[in-house]
Image: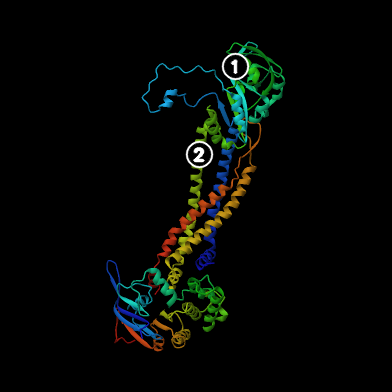
Amino acid sequence: MNPVLAAERLGRILPGEMPVTLVRDIDLEVERGEFLVIMGPSGSGKSSLLYLLGLLDTPTSGRVLLDGQDTSGYGEDQLANTRLRRLGFVFQFHFLLAEFTVLENVRLPMRRLGALDEETARHRAKDLLDQFGLRDHAHKHPHQLSGGQRQRVAIARALANDPMMILADEPTGNLDSHASANVQEILHNLTRQMGKTVVAVTHDLNFAGAADRRIGIVDGQIDLDWQM
Amino acid sequence: MSVQLAIAVTQLISRRRPTLVSLTGIALGVAFFLAVSSLMRGSERDFIKRLIDNSPHITVSDEYRHAQKQPVRERWPEGAIEVRRVKPLTEVRGIRGHGQKLAFIESLPGLRAAPVLVGSVVLTFAGRIEGVTLNGIIPEKMKGVSTIEEKLIHGSLEALATNPNGIAIGDGLAKKFGLEMGSVVNVSSPAGEVRTLKVTGIFHTGNVNYDDSQTFVLLKRAQGLLDRANRINRLILQLDDPYAARETAAVIERRIGYKSLSWQESAEDLMSVLLVRNLIMYSVVAAILVVASFGIYNTISTIVMEKIQDIAILKSMGFHARDIRRIFLAEGLILGALGSLIGVTLGIGLMWLLAQVEIKPPGATEIVHLPIYWGWEQYLMAAGFALASAAGAAYLPARKAGQVQPVTILRGMA
C-alpha cells in the first residue's frame, strides 16, 4: 500500500544575500493511520519540514507526494484546494478568529468548501464540538474559553472538512499538563478511532511518548541518533 | 451570505470606531457632492430657463446660411468653371411664400409660430429723436411664442389688436422720452412713411437694452410703415420641449431653406461656458470623494495589519488569495455603499436646507430662492463615484492581504 504522505529528497532554502538552509534532503514516508512525531531542538527545521509536508510552503528541491500524487506541479489554487479538502492544521497558538463564535469558527472551512448545506454543516460542527466536550461552549467566543478548550476547538476546526491527515505544530506548546494530556489523547484517538493520519512537531516528551513513531531533526536533516 | 462576506462584515463591526470614521468621510463627501452639484446644476438650469423664456426657441429669418450657388456649379460641382461678373439677383427682402412656410411649420407637433416683420424706424416726440426697432406682430399669435405679454406693466397686447395705431414700448424708452399710456409719438421709416401712434402698452423685461430699443405694433401697421406690404422677415417659434430646438430647427431649415437659428446655436458660447463650469465642478466634488476614500484605505490597511494572523490561518485552511482579496474589497464596497446611502440622505437634507435660503440680489426688488436641481442622476453619480473610489481605496490593501504567505506569519509566531 502506498504511504499516505511521502517526502523525496525534500529541501528548502530561504533565498537572500545569505541563503539559509531550513530543510535538507529529507526522505520520509508516513503510513495511513500513523501517529508520527517530529522532534528536534529549536531552529532545527522541524516546523519548516511540517509546513512543506502540509503544502503551506513549496520546497526548493525534492517533492512531496500526497496519497501517491506528486504535488510539485500544483499551482497556488490547487495547493489551497488540497489543504482545504485533505489536510487539517493545528498550531501552537489556536488562531481562532476572535470575532466569531466557537461554532462559527468550526464551520469556516465547511463554508469555504461549500460541500454541505447550511443545516448539515451546522449539525456536523456541533457533533465535532460534542466529541471534544465543547457542546456547551458552541456559542461562546474564543476569549471566553481556556487554553485547552481553545486548542480543542482548533482541532475540531481542523477536522471540519473530514481531512485524511492532521498536521500539528507544537499543539501542546502553550498548554498545562492536564490540557496537554487531553490534546494528546484526542490526537491519538484520531488515528485509532477515525483512521486519520497525524504528523506532529513537538518538544513535549510526554506527548511524543504516545506516538507510533518518532523522528529527530537536527540542522534540517533527519538524525537517527537524536535522543531527547 | 458567502463566508468571505461574513468575515468582512464581522471585521467591520468589530472595529467600530475606524469604520464609523471612514463611513462619515464618505457620507460627508457624498453629501457635499450633492449639495454643490444641485446648486450648480440648479443655477445652470435657472440661467438656461431665463435664456429660453426671454428669447425665441427658434428664429427663422429671411437669410440663407450659405450664399446661393450658380446653377452651373450645381450641375458640374467638379467642373473647371468660371463665371465672371456675377451679380446676385436683386431680391426683395423678406420670407417668400411665408403663408405656406408658416403652415408647414405649424403642422409640426409641439410648437407654436408667429410671423414678425422687424425693421428700424425713428421715433420723434417733443423734439427728441431716437432710432428704435419696430416689431410688427399679430398679437394673438405672439402670445403663444413670447413672454412679452407677461412683461407688460401697463396696457395689453389686445389693445394693439383693437387699435391699429397703438404701439407698445419698453419702460426705458418711456422714461427717456417722458411717455405715458396714451401719449402720442411720431414714427417715421426709411421708406419715408410717417405715422402718429399712441402708446397702448409699456413693458419691463429687466433687460435694459431691450427695454430701451424694442417697440411692438400691429403687423399690418408695420408692413405699411416699412412699405413692405404683405411681407414678413421673421418667424418666431416656441416649443413645448425647448431642448428639441436644435433638431427642429434643422428639420425646418432643410425643408424651407431659410436660416433657422435655435436658441442653443445662438447661445453656443454660453452653453460651452456652462459645460466647462460643470466639468470643473464635478472634478472638484469628485476630488472630495477621492480624499474621503483615503479613510477607507486607512481603515482597511489597519484591519489587514491587525488581522494578518487570521489571514494566515484562513490561507492555511485552504482559502485562496482571491478569497482574501474579496474579503477586503467587500469591506471597501460595504463602506462605500453604506457611506453613499447615508450621504445621499444627508445630501437631500442639505439640498432642502439650501432651497430654503432666501437671497435678495443687489439692486433687485424680489427675494429669490437658491435654485436647486433635484435630478436623480446626481444621486447615481455621487454614489457611483463613492463606490468607485471606495473600491479603489480597498484594492491596494486587499491585494496585499491576498499576497500574505501563511508560512512567513507562522514562522514569525513560533
Q: Give the quarter of the image for residue B165.
A: top right
Is disc 1 surrounded by few (<14), some (14 to 19) or many (20+) residues within 10 Å? some
Q: Label 2 is placed on what type of residue?
A: Leu
Q: Which residue is mark 2?
A: B275
Is disc 2 surrounded by few (<14), some (14 to 19) or many (20+) residues within 10 Å? few
Q: Is residue B53 above or below residue A108?
A: above
Disc 2 element: helix
- Residue B133 image point, x, y percent: 59, 20
Res. A91 visible in picture? no
**What quarter of the picture does the N terminus of chain B occupy?**
bottom right
Which mark is first along the chain, 2 or 1? 1
Mark 1 chain? B
Res. B214 visible in picture? yes
**How many angstroms separate mark 1 from mark 2 (CA)?**
43 Å
Disc 1 element: loop
Foreground residue, B108 or B287?
A: B108
Query: Residue B228: which disc?
Result: 1
- Which residue is located at x 48 percent, y 53 percent? B389
- Residue B335 image point, x, y percent: 53, 58
